[in-house]
Amino acid sequence: MADAPTSILFIGDVVGGLGRRTLLALLPGLRERFDPTFVVVNAENVAGGLGITPKIADEILAADVDAITLGNHAYHRKEIYPYLDAQERIVRPANYLSSQPGRGWTVVERNGTRLGVVNMSGNLYLRAGRPAFVEIESVLGRLEGQADQVLLDMHAEATSEKVGMGWFLDGRVTAVVGTHTHVPTADARVLPGGTAYITDVGMTGPRGGVIGVRKEQAIESLRTHMSVRFETSDEDPWLMAVFVRCAETPRRAASIEQVLVPWSP
Ligand SMILES: [Fe+2]
Ligand SMILES: [Fe+2]
């Protein structure tokens, strides 16, 4: 029997303790259902809704997660700075300033297959020192010959930047997956050149809030324009992900499937 094709389960922004519990509770069942070669998790909101700590990153990696991606909240917790420099399986946007802690891409290996994991930030409404569309060329150049498959987590606010990046990399990487808005989009597909694409994977956390925040607090802030303390919502947790099956040709996808699963604690 031929070996199963390489596959990647990519899980969208894990938000707060509830998101973390949702991830850890549902991951074993997803492994049974999909048998993914690689599991990659965006965890930029995992520490109380903002940032990540070394302890939490270790906990996620200990669940046999291959790599963690981040985004604009990467530096919210200071204790993560040395960890970002030391731990090769966690990446922050590659187009940040080189003086900022951490790396923007990494290569992880399973069963002799190498997956390049790249994190990139959009430039619209987000602070990133260098343009994503320029920096990605340099990263792909450095990954040449280093990775059999490549996954880009394009962490961006604007749908246009994510759609544009999908077309720009079509036929050059296995998958371009969007994160950051915490709301899943309905456009998952394999582009004509063979790159799996989705504008936003969504989040793993409380769907009963406003992109993770308690809805009463978010509404009060939107209504009054006053300073409101934000806490992570504890209502209606879901895990949101995509499952990408790789094609036989390196760096191409055969399929992408949206995975949206509610969790009852
Ligand atoms: Fe996020
Ligand atoms: Fe974000």
Image (cartoon, rainbow, N blue to C red):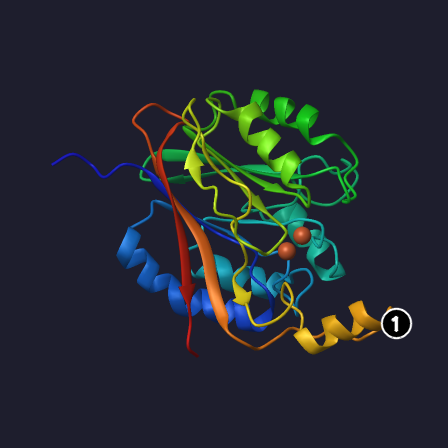
Horizontal and vertical percent position of residue 93: 67, 41
Q: Is residue 213 left or right of residue 196?
A: right
- Residue 100 vs residue 127, the one in the foreground: 127
Query: At label 1, which amino acid type do we have?
Result: Met
Quadrant hosting residue 250: top left
**In the drawing, does residue 230 fall left or right of residue 54?**
right
**Residue drawn 54% across the image and 47% down it:** 89
Residue found at the very far right of the displayed protein: 226
Q: Residues within 10 Å of mark 1 (few under 14, many from 20)?
A: few
23 and 214: which one is in front? 214
Q: Which residue is mark 1?
A: 226
Q: Residue 226 appears in which quarter of the rendering?
A: bottom right
**Quadrant of the drawing holding the N terminus:** top left
Q: Quadrant of ligand 1?
A: bottom right
- Residue 119 position, x and y percent, is 60, 40
- Which residue is pictured at 70% across the width and 75% down the height? 231
Measured as percent of width and height from the top left, residue 175 is found at: 47, 35
Residue 207 sits above or below residue 260 on the image:
below
Asked whether, in this view, residue 225 is left or right of residue 20, the answer is right
- Furthest-front residue in view? 223
